[in-house]
Amino acid sequence: MKLRIALLIMMAPFVLGINTLSEGYRIPVGGSTRIYVPYVSSQGSCYIINNNHANSDLFVPTKTSTEWTTFVGASKPAFIVATQCYPKSCKEIKELMGSPADGTYTIDSDGTGANAQYSAYCDMTTDGGGWTRIFRHNVAGGYFASTADAQSKNTGAPTGNLYSQLTKIPDFATNGKYRFRQTWPGYSNKNIWLQSTNPLSDVVVAGWTPIMATAITDKWGGLELGNGTHGPINNNQALLDGSMQVSDWWYAIGSTVAYGTPAGIPAASSMLGSNVGVAEVNLWIKEDDTYTTYNSCKAILDAGASIGSGLYTINPGGAGAIPVYCDMTTDGGGWTRILNHNYSDGVFANVAETLSYNSGAPLAARYSIMGRVAGFYRSGKLELKINWPGSGSAIRNWWTQTSNFTSQPVAGYVAVTIESTSNYWGGLEYNGASNTALADGSANHSNWFYAVGMMAPAGYGTPAGIPACDTVTGAGTIGVPRVELWVK
């Protein structure tokens, strides 16, 4: 075997396509290379090879399993030092092994760092696979003794009821971002997002980007330290929570006490209602900061990438990625909400605000991305829908038009499903010069019913609100509390 290795050293400069699995690896004099190959076991085989030869490069064969195992298992000259290593994550295992099964694997998330390898449970199939579970809490195992206890617990038992490897989070950063997934077994809801801050750090969440999320109530906006100097505290009821900058502790990770009836872990009030706990929560991580930016919620639905109504990040017209709320079920689904205006939060100050306001907070009470509507044109048309939540009426109008209502009079109007034609309805047209609203649906008339982007500071009607139409409110001067505008 020593003779064979020597010959390989002499051949090294002449090997083409070097440093690939199919051709083998060349390690220069005094060099070291981590080689991870899909042989030997279900998670592959990993070694760090050091070449301490005085004047010759080393060639390591990896083309076949036989070549690799022969090299690793053979008696070697003293100048070759082979040290076993481990894959860094479930993602690295999946990328190498192709379609590995879900289960427990041995990983070393800091790579060549000082920390030892450890057992981790890998989800290799869901949401693209390659997810490393860094936290599991099932209340059958009780609760964590303290928030400190929740940072690292039962690290050798990744399928246990009280398991935490949260201190490993920094190992999974990619270009300064963390990709998380939070799930509650037994429920279809899940949240997948990016954030640039480590939730164990005493800082306000930054860089939050929802990739797909269906549990979004209760001020959700990523994960943050539940107790610290950066904001309101949850009184050490949980190590982390997702209720941003409030003392609530929804989306809890590392609960130290029970919540609700039945007793459990607080997830999201939209899942079970308030004061109800769930039995289990999991937190997953994957070192990947990439995601597909579709043009619209409809494009997400058409691509089969929807997980239900919730928050997604899209890039309408290629003008920049933004988080939005998608309705993936009503009227065929694929609706992007471009306006949510709750009158109790006030009115828009000017036309500029009506076009873009709280654009990074799609659940805000006063929110608009109507200035991006041009990016939603399909076949020369906008497909739009308007409705009035909280008005006591389920009426909505659904139509198409060719004109851009943020700057033009209505044109090319075609009804799809119209449930109100009162007050001169005929599609949306620009009305910004009036300083009452950006646009309204009283086509070619001075009235401003069906208003979107309301600016009138005194409101409309009694009780004061937003002008909808007589079909919604009944005859008289009556405002509604809220309006939504959607595009598809």
Image: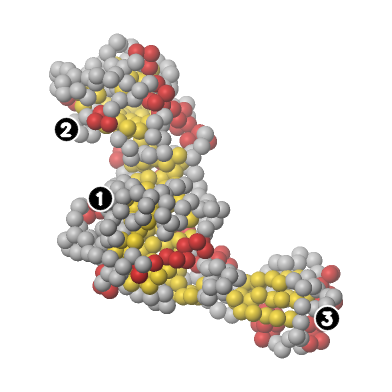
Q: Residue at x 58, y 70 (%)?
A: 113
Residue carrying label 2: 392
The kind of residue on which mark 2 rests is Gly
Residue to which mark 1 is pinned: 270
Residue 417 to residue 120: above or below:
above
Disc 3 marks which residue? 7
Left or right: residue 116 versus residue 300 is right
Rendering coords of residue 355 (x, y %): 41, 26
- Across the whole image, how many numbered discs are drawn on residues? 3
Q: Is residue 453 in view?
A: no
The residue at the point 20 percent across, 58 percent down is 276
Tell me which numbered mark, 3 or 1, is placed earlier along the sequence: 3
Estimate the spatial distance between the alpha carbons at disc 1 and disc 2, rounded to whole Å.
Answer: 21 Å
Q: From the viewer's side, name the closer residue of 374 and 225.
A: 225
Q: Secondary structure at mark 1?
A: helix
Image location of residue 99, percent across then percent down: 51, 67
Task: Classify residue 77 by image quadrant.
Answer: bottom right
Specify few, some or many for label 3: CA neighbours under 10 Å numbering under 14, 14-19, or 20 or more: few
Q: Determine whether the residue tagged by mark 3 lies in a helix, strand or loop.
A: helix
